[in-house]
Amino acid sequence: MLKRFKKCITRAIIVASITTLSSISWAAELEEIHFIVPGGAGGGWDMTARGTGDVLMKEGLVDTVSYQNLSGGGGGKAIAHMIETAARQQDTLMVNSTPIVIRSLTGIFPQSFRDLTPVAATIADYGAIVVANDSKYQNWQEVVADFKQDPRKVKVAGGSARGSMDHLIVAAAFKGEGFDARSVRYIAYDAGGKAMAAVLSGETPLLSTGLGEVLEMSKSGQVRVLAITAPERLAAAPNVPTLTEMGNQTVFANWRGFFASPGISDEKVAQWNKAFAAMYKTDRWTTVRDRNGWIDNYKADKDFYAFLEEQEQQMGDLMRELGFLK
Amino acid sequence: MLDGILIGLSTAMMPTNLMMVMVGCFIGTFIGMLPGLGPISAIALMIPVTYGLDPSSGMILMAGVYYGAIFGGSTSSILINAPGCSSTVVTAFDGYPLAQKGQAGKALALAAYSSFTGGTLSAIMLLVAAPALAKVSLSFQSSDYFALMLVGLSAVAAFAGKGQVLKAWMMTILGLMLATVGIDKGIGVERFTFGLTDLMDGFSFLLLAMATFALGETLMGILKPEKDTAGAENSALSEIGSMKISKEEIKEVAPVALRSSILGFFIGVLPGAGATIAAFLSYGLERNLAPKDKKEEFGKGSLRGLVAPESANNAASSGSFVPLLTLGIPGSGTTAIMLGALISYGIQPGPRLFVDNPEIFWSVIISMYVGNVVLIILNLPLIPYISKLLAVPRTVLLPMIIFFSITGVYLVSFNTIDVFIMIAIAMVAILLRLANFPLAPLLLGFILGGLMEENLRRSLMISDGELSFILERPITLTFTIISVLVLVAPVLLTILNRYRVKKAKLVEKVG
């Protein structure tokens, strides 16, 4: 009852804000999308779902959009929910990202992306190695030189546990330089902001994170990005060098995308992808994307599936090397 | 800087923005009063609304909701022992006993005045020193946080009644143990989850507080109806809405409010602590500073015990805007949502914010002050009516509390398992209550334990496994010494007293 009431309020607010913005809406091909967010309000997943849903609806690609935050089990609760109630989830998309691959590998999730219907990857963020503005390191090569002398001197902060994404990014980067990935000293913080505070306060010299999280801070001169794990330089950050141009072959993209429940028809998946494809062409999407520091990385349906398998292989190898998998 | 303040003042005083503060405070107070629903839920609900507003108005609205929710949270803590958000858990320790004594109106009024003091003092501190305070935010490293939590834990005796010190320690250790459940934040290993997905995120602090306090208390009320002396209650009812606070009482709590506001503000400025920690620490500090006869009142309806956490949590909430606005670092879940909202306006908080967007920077700070004034004007006249809630017959009130506590916990996660976990914990809590174990130390151990462990492990990793970090950083060393002193002082004092008595006796004999 209360939940329905809350939904009503949210809808009323959405409707009200549309009318005040006097945007035009017409009958869309998709009637409804219900987004399930496996984490709390305001997080990365939440922003992705709400940003995407907002554009889809305001552009008239979907008639109504609703959101549900279903946190628990590091995201596992939502996956289980998608599978258990598959019959009732015909219009539901769950947002997820690289951790679904990592957590399936470690067994935190008993299921994997194969138990769901991968619909599309929509955006990506690349890994970034960051230092405070007053750091002694001017470039990645200096870090590598110090690491060669004594890996214990080069401690790296990250906003997630050992064996999770921030750790894997920096381990992959040092592995790409020919070092043992296990010798990387990774210090885990419980949130990205706290890891950032550690680097700014000089507690740890390096930070491993996503470029999107530090792009604006680097523009305002608080931090410097030494390298990113993109295959080539990005239009959003033309001055930031990639590891590949320094002879390090590490490429790593943290994708974000959407999954449907198992057993969804191919037509439905195609419909969703049609809406996504149309979304990329709108100015409204460009605005939302840029203000969040996202990078377009559209991989639909089968491509997405192939990409997930490839990433599973890459992550799995690295995690075995680090001793997180046997 | 004066220009900036003037710009901020004129922005904050615009009729639309004044209305935003009022609307925000009102909505926030209302949502905050519902047990379990706190600032995070309230702000998340407002985000779609703020998209249509200009950045300053949006931020002012959200800030208003934020203070309102914290303000409202203390109401449910005091009246029904069911905290609205984690930072008002400590408020229940003494606020609820006061309300039970028939002084609900007084307790609510005191809470309102303390919140106002905390909020106002910290708004002034922000106004004077915000840009400079960024340095304070970055002055704490992992080992310092560890030592700070250690000080907090050493105050455990403060949370125990007379002769309960051993039991209090046992409960603290139980709290520390509960904090280890879930996916470990350092290595990502599951601990004590027994393979259950529902235990992977560990227990939520708010759930634990609601289960042990709101549910536990209510069920105890049903188990021991003889405690429910209707006659005494009826006579107390006439007083229930009275907000009278005597001059002596003001004299007693004024320094408490001042100290707690300053302490709370600085704890709030640290990105790794927050309003809940601030409330616990100030409560512990005041208990230790109180004169002997006042000490025993703590936990039974002490005015100091109510004023301290209420001033501290409000001051800390304002303090948490320092790392958000000056560094772009969110120190709490709530400020993380606000950061998201700012970024979606195309505004990056950081050292350049008060240069590039002075109107936002200063108007948010000024609106904090305005928000505090609005809240006190809005809430004081309502207190007599709100506190009449306790005049509802217990047969109606108790089921209502149970209903609201359970829905509150459900609405946070939309997870039915949480409700079952809550009921299970409440059952255990009742057993512990019957055996006369104090439950506040359990919560203290839980909230400090997790942070303490994380920070200790981090400091050890940074120092390559050497314990020398305790000596190397002055802040760490100072806090460690303080916590040792707090632990040892009572023992030393007893020994000293015995020695004195003996000496006096000897002198008598000789004389």
Image: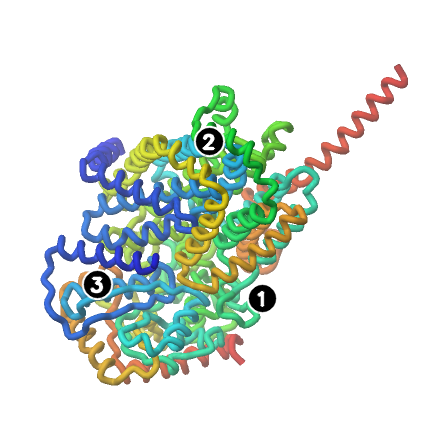
Q: Look at 32% across and 62% down and name the residue there.
A: A46
**Foreground residue among A227 and B186:** B186
For marks 2 and 3, give the one nearer the viewer. 2
Q: What residue type is labelled 3?
A: Asp
**Chain letter for mark 2:** B
Q: Which amino acid does label 1 sit on?
A: Phe
Q: In which quarter of the image is residue A129?
A: bottom left
Is B469 above or below relative to A124? above
**Chain letter for mark 3:** A
Task: Report the Cα–Cα distance between label 1 and label 3.
Answer: 40 Å
**Foreground residue among A261 and B369:** A261
**Foreground residue among B202 and A91:** A91
Q: Which mark is residue B192?
A: 1
Q: What residue type is labelled 2?
A: Ile
**Chain letter for mark 1:** B
SS state under label 2: loop
Image position of B59 (left or right of B441): left
Q: In the picture, which quadrant includes the C terminus of chain B?
A: top right
Question: Which of marks 2 and 1 precedes in the sequence?
Answer: 1
**Foreground residue among B38 and B335:** B38
Q: Which mark is residue A30?
A: none
Position in image of residue A73 (x %, y %): 46, 67
Q: Name the residue under label 2.
A: B240
Q: Name the residue under label 3.
A: A54
SS state under label 3: helix
Count numbered badges in the picture.
3
Position in image of residue B89 (x %, y %): 49, 45
Is B134 above or below relative to B208? above
